[in-house]
């Protein structure tokens, strides 16, 4: 196996640690059951990033470069000592809660625009109520016309 460059080891370590921190259970959380049987499932947004870098440096600060390895040896390896580092970060923020129960599934967002989203969710119910109201008014108007016709026929 060919010698691995030290930067590969840094990147591999960073990626393995991020993989351990972030899994599907971080995004779609564990379900919680309420006393009434409703199941609540948290949903989160996960952002992560990492960086790694480094370089090979000589020990004399310029000019003729001496191969110094930090262990007292200065010849025979053909490489300069490696200096590097890596870092990473993860951000988890709740986005919504999925509520399953009472023969329905609802997604309740956790945002500043939650009220707008809620209004959009209520539009079908509002249209249904408006249709019911219009139907009732039309039925009442038709009944009133029929009653007026009957009164006119009876009085003549």
Image (cartoon, rainbow, N blue to C red):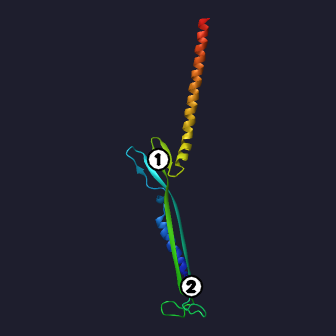
Provide the residue designation for mark 1. Answer: 99
The picture quadrant where one finds residue 59 is bottom right
Quadrant location of the N terminus?
bottom right
Is 75 in front, or is 91?
A: 91
Q: CA distance from mark 1 to mark 2?
A: 55 Å
Task: Give the crowd class for mark 2: few <14, some 14-19, many >=20 residues within 10 Å.
Answer: few
Q: Secondary structure at mark 1?
A: strand
Label 2: which residue?
56
Q: Is residue 134 above or below residue 21?
A: above
Q: Position of residue 32 (x, y in %)?
A: 41, 51
Residue drawn at the location 53% of the way across and 87% of the way down: 81
Which residue, as the protein is rendered here, is positioned at the far left?
Answer: 35
The mark nearer the N terminus, 1 or 2, is: 2
Residue 63 placed where, x, y %? 61, 93
Looking at the picture, does residue 102 appear above or below residue 63?
above
Q: Residue at x 54, y 75 (%)?
A: 52
Compared with residue 29, is residue 36 higher up or lower down, i.e. above or below? above
Element at label 2: strand
Query: Which numbered tag is attached to residue 75?
Result: none
Residue shown at the point (46%, 46%) measured from the top left: 100
Location of the C terminus by quadrant is: top right
For this orientation, the residue located farthest to the top is 156
Percent of width and height locating residue 106:
50, 45
Of residue 53 and residue 39, the one placed in the foreground of this image is 53
């Amino acid at each position: 196996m060919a010698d691995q460059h030290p930067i590969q080891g840094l990147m591999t370590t960073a990626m393995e640690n991020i993989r351990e921190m972030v899994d599907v259970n971080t995004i779609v959380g564990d379900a919680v059951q309420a006393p009434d049987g409703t199941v609540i499932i948290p949903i989160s947004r996960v952002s992560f990033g990492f960086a790694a870098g480094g370089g090979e440096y000589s020990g004399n600060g310029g000019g003729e470069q001496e191969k110094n390895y930090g262990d007292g040896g200065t010849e025979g390896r053909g490489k300069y000592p490696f200096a590097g580092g890596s870092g990473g970060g993860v951000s988890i923020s709740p986005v919504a809660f999925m509520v399953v129960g009472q023969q329905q599934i609802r997604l309740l967002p956790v945002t500043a625009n939650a009220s707008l989203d809620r209004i959009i969710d209520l539009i079908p119910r509002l249209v249904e109520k408006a249709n019911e109201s219009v139907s009732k008014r039309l039925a009442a108007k038709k009944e009133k016309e029929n009653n007026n016709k009957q009164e006119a026929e009876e009085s003549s």
